[in-house]
Image (cartoon, coloured by chain):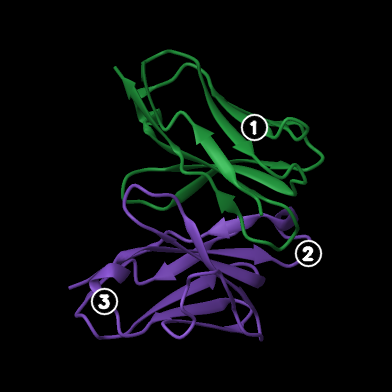
């Protein structure tokens, strides 16, 4: 059964820093891997979706990579801003039509 | 993009009552919907998978008689928390997967329903 782990659990950085959030998964037969953002008390905002055949996806200051052989994905945030403060969740599924399995998230705090 | 709505967005009820939460795909047909639960400062935990026209599949440890799921159409799934107790207080989030060709199998998430049981 797929398990998703995220480290670190929490991260504090000053504004302007580039940072990397890590996600690892136990079953390399990934169908989709997705990164989400969640603000306190709110729902999920999808950031990036990487399909099995893809190695990375980019959106603005965000870049997510997928390395199935090592069981890892990273979310790179460039030039962090206080507005980036939130919990970032990594999730993956192994077959089309199956549920996403979530990691516990990394709570990011960017100070001005 | 595909939109999923949930209703209500929050609900407060007394212990012992039942609460129904609706999950709707607004601009696409969803063959499969998923229900998740999130306790404070925890991640999302899958409760059940719901396929239109068939019985839901529940994850281990989730009581199917307590959490009733109905997926009667391609755009609506409902979760009913029966005889709710304070320990059922949580954030309930649904997601919907479109038919083939809609979003390449991507799942679209609703905004969540916060349930508080007094």
Question: From the viewer's perspective, is the residue at label 3 or at label 2 nearer?
Answer: 3
Q: Which residue is mark 1?
A: A73
Looking at the image, is mark 3 or mark 2 earlier in the sequence? 3
**Picture coordinates of residue B53 (x, y %)?**
66, 86
Q: Is residue B95 left or right of residue A1?
A: left
Disc 3 versus disc 2: distance between alpha carbons?
39 Å
* Label 1 Cα neighbours within 10 Å, binned few <14 / some 14-19 / many ≥20: many
Q: Quadrant of residue A81?
A: top left
Chain bearing tag 1 is A
Q: Is residue A109 above or below residue A95?
A: above
Report whether A29 appears left or right of A60: right
Mark number, residue B85: 3
* Label placed on residue B66: none
Residue placed at 65% from the left, 81% from the top? B52
Q: Quadrant of the N terminus of chain B?
A: bottom right
Do the residues marked 2 and 1 share a common chain?
A: no
For the residue carrying disc 2, how many other residues have a C-alpha within 10 Å: few (<14), some (14-19), or many (20+)?
Answer: some
Q: Marks 2 and 3: in contact by CB < 8 Å?
A: no
Q: Where is mark 2, residue-wise?
A: B100
Q: Residue at x 61, y 44 (%)?
A: A34
Give the letter of the green chain. Answer: A
Q: Where on the picture, by quarter, is residue A53?
A: top right
| Secondary element type, mark 2 | loop
Display colour for chain B: purple
The CA distance from mark 2 to mark 1 is 26 Å
* Residue closest to the eye, B9 or A40: A40
In the rendered image, residue B60, in percent from the top left (x then y), is placed at 54, 69
Q: Which residue occupies 17% across, 73% down?
A: B118
Residue B101 in view (yes/no): yes
What is the CA distance from the residue labelled 1 to the residue labelled 3?
Answer: 38 Å
Tell me the quarter of the picture where residue B95 sits.
bottom right
Asked whether the residues under marks 3 and 2 belong to the same chain, the reply is: yes
């Amino acid at each position: 059964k797929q398990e998703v782990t995220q480290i670190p659990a929490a991260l504090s950085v000053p504004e302007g820093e580039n940072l990397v959030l890590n996600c690892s998964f136990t079953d390399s037969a990934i169908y989709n891997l997705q990164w989400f953002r969640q603000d306190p008390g709110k729902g999920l905002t999808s950031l990036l979706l990487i399909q099995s055949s893809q190695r990375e996806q980019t959106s603005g200051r965000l870049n997510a990579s997928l390395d199935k052989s090592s069981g890892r994905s990273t979310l790179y945030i460039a030039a962090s801003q206080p507005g980036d403060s939130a919990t970032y969740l990594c999730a993956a599924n192994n077959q089309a039509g199956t549920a996403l399995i979530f990691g516990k998230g990394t709570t990011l705090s960017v100070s001005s | 993009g595909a939109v999923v709505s949930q209703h209500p967005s929050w609900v407060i009820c007394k212990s012992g009552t039942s609460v129904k939460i609706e999950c709707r795909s607004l601009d696409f047909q969803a063959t499969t919907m998923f229900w998740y639960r999130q306790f404070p400062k925890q991640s999302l935990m899958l409760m059940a998978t719901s396929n239109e026209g068939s019985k839901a599949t529940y994850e281990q440890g989730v009581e199917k008689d307590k959490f009733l799921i109905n997926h009667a159409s391609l755009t609506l799934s409902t979760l009913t928390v029966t005889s709710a107790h304070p320990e059922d207080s949580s954030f309930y989030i649904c997601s919907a997967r479109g038919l083939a060709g809609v979003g390449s199998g991507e799942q679209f998430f609703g905004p969540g329903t916060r349930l508080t049981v007094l």
